[in-house]
Image: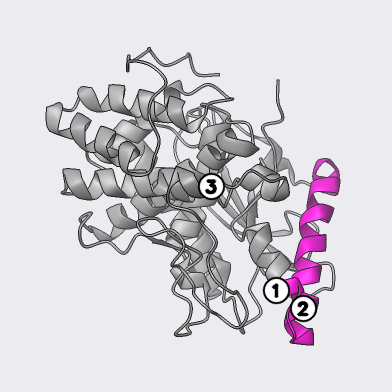
Amino acid sequence: MRDRRPIRCIIPPYIMDRLAASRDPAVRARAVAALASAAAFRAHRGLAHRAPEVLARRAPEGGKRRMVYDARNARTLPGRLVLSEGGKRPRDPAVREAYEHSGATYDFYQMLFRRDSLDDHGMPLVSSVHVADTDGQPLDNAFWNGEQMAYGDGDAVIFTRFTKALDVVAHELTHGVQAFTSNLEYRDQPGALNEHFSDVFGILVRQWKQGETADAASWLIGADILVPAKTRRAIRDMLHPGTAYVDDPDLGTDPQPGHMRGLYRGPKDNGGVHLNSGIPNRAFALAATKIGGKAWEVTGRIWYETLLRLPPKAQFADCARMSIAAAAGHGAAARKAVADAWRTVGVRPRRAPTLEPPPRAP
């Protein structure tokens, strides 16, 4: 069985590589430290000093259980427990945001899909805030390590506090949902689908919490973790890949393709897992805006049904086939909207769509 505990960072390596080549020595140093930190967390993940509460992965009674730890500007996880389920919320905004946003993510999956936490068995939602990089500075990233969330505070020049963005928190926690469902292999097209589903449900949790309709939503991922500038709006734009930041002096220009003709085929970014996610991202956003209304009500259900059925090595064409088949259960108009969306981004299903039953939960 493949490892269900990988490191999944919200900031793609191609952004960090760009920052590591910055003319600004401070920006360059922070990016190099962030890249080193990701490698260090991967290397030492199994050696983390985990509290007993973190090891209690399942709640016999099920239900929402959140724990927020303060890493106190260190790299050792989880840190000191500062807030647990139902406790008094401290003034620290990072603690409050980690607690509230993980709770919103739990509520979304429970209320819409009757899913009891990430594993569907009451897995506690553990977060560490104020995590540092290898230089002891606030980490310029947030990640899911297969057991818990970790958030940096950002450099206040490009990135701000990573707990601020509900879509970022929900994105990372959805990597946990995927580990207990499709468990998509994290490279090439399966890895791009892995990132894609996290973007989909990350943005749906935010839209659901804010009550936004598909046509009124921004479809931007990570807008709240960037220090505002005219040249950057977000980390990714699902509806218009390649436009999240343009000619930014620090970030450059968003390289995400929105069509198969721009598919990245090289070795970087695990075969383009963050880059190529722009293609299925655009398909989802197009389908959602065409179907209309609140995206989580129909399009989100179609994608959740698809997530439950995809094999670990699924390609874009497999996702197209299964989502079209799932859409058929929501009416002819929904099926056509989904099929048209995949056709628009240059993806065609490999064979006639049929809907297989989902596998048993692990």
User: Distance from label 2 to label 3 (Cα)?
Assistant: 26 Å
Query: Does label 1 or label 3 sit earlier along the sequence?
Result: 1
How is colour applied across the structure in the image?
Answer: one colour
Residue 249: which quarter of the image? bottom right
Q: Residues within 10 Å of mark 3 (few under 14, many from 20)?
A: many
User: Which of label 2 and label 3 is nearer to you?
Assistant: 3
Specify the principal SS of the magenta part: helix
Query: Residues in magenta?
Result: 20-47
Where on the picture, by quarter, is residue 351? top left
> SS of the residue at dot 3?
loop
Q: Where 190 falls versus 329 (above or below)?
A: below
Give the label on residue 28, or none: 2
Q: Amino acid at mark 2?
A: Arg
**Residue that sits furthest to the front in the current view:** 261
Q: Which residue is mark 3?
A: 276
Asked whether the beta carbons under mark 2 and mark 3 sit within 8 Å of each other, the answer is no
Three-letter code, disc 1:
Leu
Residue at 52% x, 71% y is: 225
Q: Give the residue pinned by disc 1.
A: 19
Magenta-span inclusion, residue 23 = yes
What is the x, y in percent for residue 195?
Answer: 53, 45
Q: CA distance from mark 1 to mark 3?
A: 20 Å
Check disc 3 and give the amino acid type: Asn
Q: Residue at x 50, y 58 (%)?
A: 168
Mark 2 and mark 1 residues within 8 Å of each other at the beta carbon: yes
Residue 295 visible from this viewpoint: no
